[in-house]
């Protein structure tokens, strides 16, 4: 099995957590875990697609959806 690097997702998560309260940072970590697993399982065509989905999920969580 090919091991895909998810470092780009870790960097994005770090950026998204800046200035957030502890509950929001924990939520971002949970979303990160889900996106990483999905990316490693080949559910995304590209890193860009995974990043976009990650940002959208974080934004939805922020807006309480």
Image: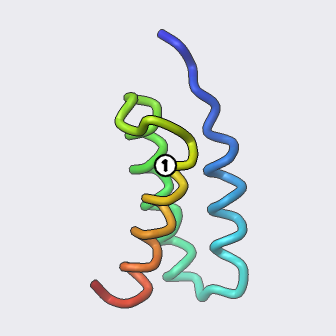
26 in relation to 47, above or below: below
25 in relation to 48, above or below: below
53 in relation to 24, above or below: above
State the residue in front, 46 or 6: 46
**Which residue is situated farthest in the left direction here?**
65
Q: Where is residue 51 shown, x and y percent of the image?
A: 54, 55
Q: Quadrant of residue 19?
A: bottom right
Q: Where is residue 62 shown, x and y percent of the image?
A: 44, 85
Q: Residue at x 69, y 42 (%)?
A: 7
Q: Residue at x 56, y 48 (%)?
A: 48
State the residue in front, 34 or 45: 45
Q: Quadrant of residue 20?
A: bottom right
State the residue in front, 48 or 31: 48
Residue 9 in the figure: left or right of residue 49 = right
Image quarter of the C terminus:
bottom left
State the residue in front, 46 or 24: 46
Q: Residue at x 48, y 49 (%)?
A: 49
Q: Residue at x 50, y 55 (%)?
A: 32
Q: Where is residue 34 shown, x and y percent of the image?
A: 39, 50
Q: Residues within 10 Å of mark 1 (few under 14, many from 20)?
A: many
Q: Which residue is mark 1?
A: 50
Colouring mode (rainbow / by chain / secondary structure / one colour): rainbow
Q: Quadrant of residue 3?
A: top right
Q: How many marks?
A: 1
Mark 1 residue element: helix
């Amino acid at each position: 099995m090919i091991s895909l690097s998810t470092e780009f997702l870790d960097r994005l998560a770090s950026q998204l957590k800046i200035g957030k309260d502890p509950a929001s940072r924990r939520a971002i970590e949970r979303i990160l875990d889900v996106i990483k697993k999905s990316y490693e399982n080949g559910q995304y065509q590209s890193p860009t697609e995974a990043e976009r989905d990650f940002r959208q999920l974080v934004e939805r969580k922020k807006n309480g959806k």
